[in-house]
Image (spheres, rainbow, N blue to C red):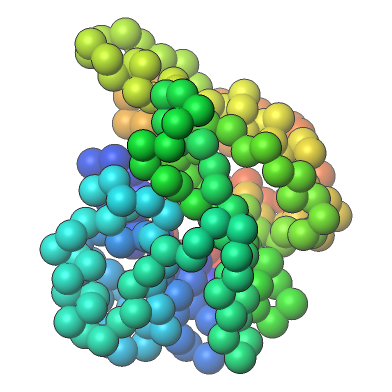
Amino acid sequence: MKLICVSTGSQEGNSYLLQLNDGKYILLDCGAKYNDIKKRCDYNPGNILFAIYTHKHKDHFKPETVKELKRAGIYVFSVKPNTKYKTSYITVNSFPVQHTNNDSTDCPNNAYIIEYCGERLLYMTDWMYCKYDLSKFKINHFLIAVNYTDLEEDEVGKMDHVARGHSSLDTAKEFLKTSITDSCRNIIVCHLSSKNADEGRIIRELTEIVPETVNVSIARKGYTFELL
């Protein structure tokens, strides 16, 4: 499998293509421009089996992109929490993660574990915390948001939104310590804040807590990752 980062972050929008061994794709989130998605799947959107979105904030669910995807005949949906979506060779497990300022749910947000050919990839973005023990899934590849390392109070209300609705490096470290098993081979960090995320520190501190056999990478627009 390959993971193609169409774009990542609040400004560019978030969309990732999981390329399967047969050349087909699964689209994770619909926050990028449609033309960018089409370009990254070799201008053949018909090869996208389906598109799943995590939540309806515009950097993950761009209405004009969703409209074009549907016009191209692509099934766009969100898997209901604590359920499974299954095809003949793909299973998507869904569970809710916190992305609000309190215990109420003003924007339901789901994380996904995608199973394909014996491989499992976790996609979890815009999460404040994860209350589930995922070690039992023996995840091979983590695609998770680490939004910030330190915060600056430079915009009224902005700090509260980031801190209470997104994951810090410390939060991600605690999550990974309990979720990583010997099956893990890749951790790909996405959706970094352009102002509040220190990439070098993220790579360094995550590398320190995972086995030497695990690759730690930063998702950037246009990057392709071989999920070996």
Residue shown at 50%/62% (left/top)? 80
The residue at the far front in this view is 104
Residue shown at 48%/65% (left/top)? 79
Q: Position of residue 202 (x, y in %)?
A: 56, 31
Place residue 9 in its image quadrant.
top left
Q: Quadrant of the C terminus?
A: bottom right
Q: Position of residue 215 (x, y in %)?
A: 67, 51
Residue shown at 69%/82% (left/top)? 117
Near-viewer residue (208 or 172):
172
* Residue 147 visible (yes or no): no
Q: Position of residue 190 (x, y in %)?
A: 46, 45
The residue at the far right in this view is 182
Q: Is residue 136 above or below residue 173?
A: below
Q: How many numbered markers are drawn?
A: 0
Q: Is residue 67 above or below residue 108?
A: below
* Residue 186 visible (yes or no): yes
Left or right: residue 66 versus residue 124 is left
Left or right: residue 189 versus residue 5 is right
Residue shown at 32%/31% (left/top)? 194
Q: Position of residue 56 (x, y in %)?
A: 31, 51
Near-viewer residue (125 or 169):
125
Left or right: residue 201 versus residue 9 is right
Q: Quadrant of the N terminus?
A: bottom right
Near-viewer residue (65 or 45):
65
Q: Is residue 197 above or below residue 66?
A: above
Place residue 72 in its image quadrant.
bottom left
